[in-house]
Amino acid sequence: MYRRRVLGFGVVFAFFAIAAIHAASAADPTYCAKYASDAEKAASLAKKLGCGFQGPRWGMDKGPHMAWCLLVDPKLAHSETEARSADLKLCSCQQYADQTMVQVAINIAKKCGFTGLRWLDNKKAHYNWCFNANPGLKAMQNEIDIRKQMLKGC
């Protein structure tokens, strides 16, 4: 009987010790609410851009993101945010370079004669500008809109 109590106490103690360690390392609800909101926004943007990302990282529902965040160390949640941002950066720069090359092709085909860095016939150069300068979506869209306006007048 004594042996069962000691064994039972040991199991209960171990459970509470693990729970205490986990609670000390888990992210707080305020952080996780922001994490879940940011994850949802990133997933929505990825869908809008047509990135085609799959898996839990790109789920559109805040609930699973919040639940996962509450269970893991904040460093892991932060690394997931970083990975999501890196994926989005790659996708958005690819989209920007693709759109730019369509506009450059129109410039060439219509013999508009536009020149300069904005009209460079080099997809990698446009991608590298996006990736290295990290201009943000508004600046990328502004460049696309400027070229679009110029092409209208051609």
Image (tube, rainbow, N blue to C red):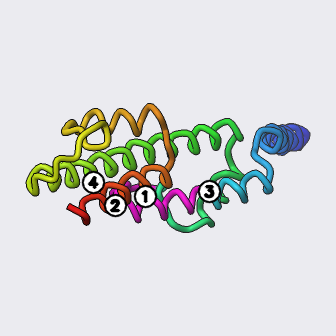
Q: Which quadrant would residue 4 be assigned to in this image?
A: top right
Disc on the earlier residue, 4 or 3: 3
What residue lies at 16% left-to-right and 53% top-to-bottom? 112
Q: Are marks 1 and 4 in contact (CB under 8 Å)?
A: no
Residue nearest the viewer, comparing 113 with 94: 113
| Residues at marks 2 and 1, CA–CA distance in whole angstroms | 6 Å
What residue lies at 44% left-to-right and 43% top-to-bottom? 89
Disc on the earlier residue, 1 or 4: 1
| Residues at marks 4 and 3, CA–CA distance in whole angstroms | 26 Å
Residue holding disc 1? 46
Q: Left or right: where does residue 136 sit relative to residue 38?
A: left
Query: Residue 86, how many percent across, how many down?
Result: 47, 40
Give the residue type at disc 3. Answer: Asp
Disc on the earlier residue, 4 or 2: 2
SS under mark 2 = loop
Residue holding disc 4? 99
Give the residue type at disc 2. Answer: Gly
Disc on the earlier residue, 2 or 3: 3
Which image quarter holds the C terminus? bottom left
Q: Which residues are magenta?
A: 38-55
Give the residue type at disc 1. Answer: Ala
Q: Are marks 1 and 3 in contact (CB under 8 Å)?
A: no
Residue holding disc 2? 50
Q: Classify 10 Å Cα crowding around label 3: few (below 14), some (14-19), many (20 and above).
A: some
Which image quarter holds the N terminus? top right
Disc on the earlier residue, 1 or 3: 3
SS under mark 1 = helix
What residue lies at 72% left-to-right and 54% top-to-bottom? 32
What is the number of the mark on residue 38?
3
